[in-house]
């Protein structure tokens, strides 16, 4: 039997029982809609989570520490020997920046300073922020503006610290106002702060080195008193030969107030005042890493350097390159692998539960085609008497089942997409009333559309196996006698 004749017969047979075939097709559509709606929910939640993490600047960043610094990430073997350890200094920073795919290598510069606003001093953690952080999610709802340049003497304050400067209550009056700019803090913008900090100065001449801490001299310790008379300060303390420390002050202009926290993962090291990265490096702030033995070499050392990449897919390669240099490297992708696995398992469960409705719809296809066999026994007998083979009869029922699968699949995708769209609109309407940014909870990618329609056709063909085989086995003589 030719394909056009086969298709014409199948369409004619489907038209004869419009209501029954339409209900069967609708059942397939509902099953496909259930599958699409559930899987698209999992995809939407995963994409929403991934997008927020990417905009936070964590997915494309590798955090680097010394191999013996503990912390996170796998350590290199044999990294505990001091002679094999590299120092995390500016030389290492330049090596990181030279790796393929790296945009910048930014050292973590943060220190405790005294911030004076008006006549009242405050102690706060001050941290440096690169200009590339302008596009991060934490600075989206910035009250005021971002830094005008990387070397500007400007400051961005945490909202809680800004409230402290104005003696305001840190608790928002309404929970829905927690992430919004506060009109009470607007007077701070453009005002000046005075930051007092400890500055690391270049090495003084031998014999005159001392740490300036507000007093020109400090009492000698018992160890210093017992030292030989001809011993110099540098011999007693190698750090004194590398640098000295002196108090400094700088004036900062407040340009912005953060409503979100870009440093939430740092715990007790969380900063309350942010300054431009280049400006902070020019201040020569005294860092905790300067108190280590490596500081005696004269080079600036850091506790951590953040390596930012052009593409998140380059993270594993850059991580491995940094580990081969003798450092400890970690990225949020390492921690997110378990989250991605959990999302995949979640998607599988959603797909399984969504497929249950499609499995029920497949029983409707079997029932419809079996009923069609009983009603069309004479027709089948005539076809076989005219020379139609068993395969022709099977193909006829397969085409009918496939047609219901195609129509039901397309209808189901449209229904699933509509359901997701309506729920997205409803959820975002509610979030808008709660002053929360809109979210995309349901997402239907193109591959899900083709997969759903293809799965619907596959289920329809499988459901047509038994009816097609039963129709092909009919005896044409008995079929022609059937009333």
Image (spheres, rainbow, N blue to C red):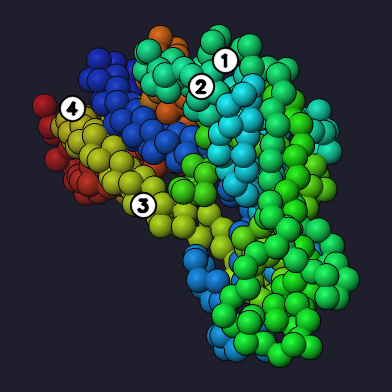
* Closer to us: 457 or 267: 267
The circle on residue 163 is 2
Labelled pair 1, 2 in contact (Cβ < 8 Å): yes
To which residue does mark 4 refer? 375
Q: Residues within 10 Å of mark 2 (few under 14, many from 20)?
A: some
* Residue picked out by circle 1: 185
Q: Earlier in the sequence, mark 4 or mark 2?
A: 2
Contact, CB < 8 Å: mark 2 with mark 3? Answer: no
Q: Is residue 120 visible?
A: yes
Sequence order check: which comes first, mark 1 or mark 4? Answer: 1
Count of marks overlaid on the render: 4
In the rendered structure, the answer to whether residue 314 lies left or right of residue 342 reads right
C-alpha distance separating marks 3 and 4: 50 Å
Where on the picture, by quarter, is residue 253?
Answer: top right
Position above or below: 92 against 79 = above
Q: Residues within 10 Å of mark 4 (few under 14, many from 20)?
A: few
């Amino acid at each position: 039997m030719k394909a056009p004749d086969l298709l014409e017969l199948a369409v004619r047979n489907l038209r004869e029982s419009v209501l029954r075939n339409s209900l069967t097709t609708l059942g397939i559509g509902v099953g496909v809609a259930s599958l699409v709606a559930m899987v698209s929910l999992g995809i939407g939640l995963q994409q929403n989570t991934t997008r927020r993490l990417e905009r936070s600047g964590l997915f494309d960043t590798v955090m680097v520490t010394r191999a013996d610094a503990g912390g996170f990430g796998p350590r290199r073997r044999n990294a505990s020997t001091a002679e094999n350890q590299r120092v995390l200094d500016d030389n290492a920073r330049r090596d990181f920046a030279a790796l393929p795919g790296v945009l910048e290598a930014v050292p973590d510069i943060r220190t405790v300073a005294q911030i004076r606003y008006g006549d009242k001093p405050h102690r706060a953690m001050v941290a440096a922020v690169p200009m590339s952080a302008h596009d991060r999610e934490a600075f989206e709802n910035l009250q005021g503006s971002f830094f005008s340049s990387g070397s500007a003497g400007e400051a961005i304050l945490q909202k809680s610290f800004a409230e402290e400067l104005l003696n305001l209550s840190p608790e928002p009056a309404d929970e829905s106002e927690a992430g919004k700019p506060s009109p009470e803090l607007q007077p701070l913008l453009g005002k000046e702060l005075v930051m007092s900090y400890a500055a690391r100065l270049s090495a003084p001449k031998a014999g005159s080195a001392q740490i300036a801490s507000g007093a020109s001299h400090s009492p000698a310790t018992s160890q210093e008193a017992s030292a030989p008379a001809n011993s110099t300060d540098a011999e007693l303390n190698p750090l004194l030969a590398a640098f000295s420390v002196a108090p400094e002050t700088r004036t900062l202009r407040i340009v912005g107030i953060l409503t979100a926290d870009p440093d939430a993962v740092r715990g007790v090291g969380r900063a309350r005042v942010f300054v431009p990265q280049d400006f902070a490096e020019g201040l020569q702030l005294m860092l905790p890493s300067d108190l280590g033995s490596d500081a005696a070499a004269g080079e600036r050392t850091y506790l951590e350097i953040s390596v930012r990449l052009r593409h998140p897919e380059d993270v594993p390669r850059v991580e491995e390159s940094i580990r081969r240099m003798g450092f400890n490297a970690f990225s949020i992708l390492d921690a997110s692998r378990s989250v991605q696995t959990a999302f995949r398992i979640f998607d599988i469960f959603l797909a399984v539960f969504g497929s249950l409705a499609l499995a029920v719809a497949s029983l409707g296809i079997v029932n419809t085609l079996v009923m069609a066999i009983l009603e069309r026994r004479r027709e089948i007998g005539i076809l076989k008497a005219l020379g139609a083979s068993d395969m022709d009869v099977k193909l006829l029922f397969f085409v009918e089942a496939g047609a219901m699968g195609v129509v039901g699949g397309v209808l189901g995708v449209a229904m699933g997409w509509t359901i997701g769209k309506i729920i997205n609109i409803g959820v975002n309407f509610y979030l808008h009333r709660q002053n929360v940014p809109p979210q995309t909870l349901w997402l239907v990618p193109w591959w899900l559309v083709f997969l759903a329609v293809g799965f619907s056709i596959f289920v329809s063909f499988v459901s047509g196996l038994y009816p097609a085989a039963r129709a092909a086995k009919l005896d044409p003589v008995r079929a022609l006698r059937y009333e």
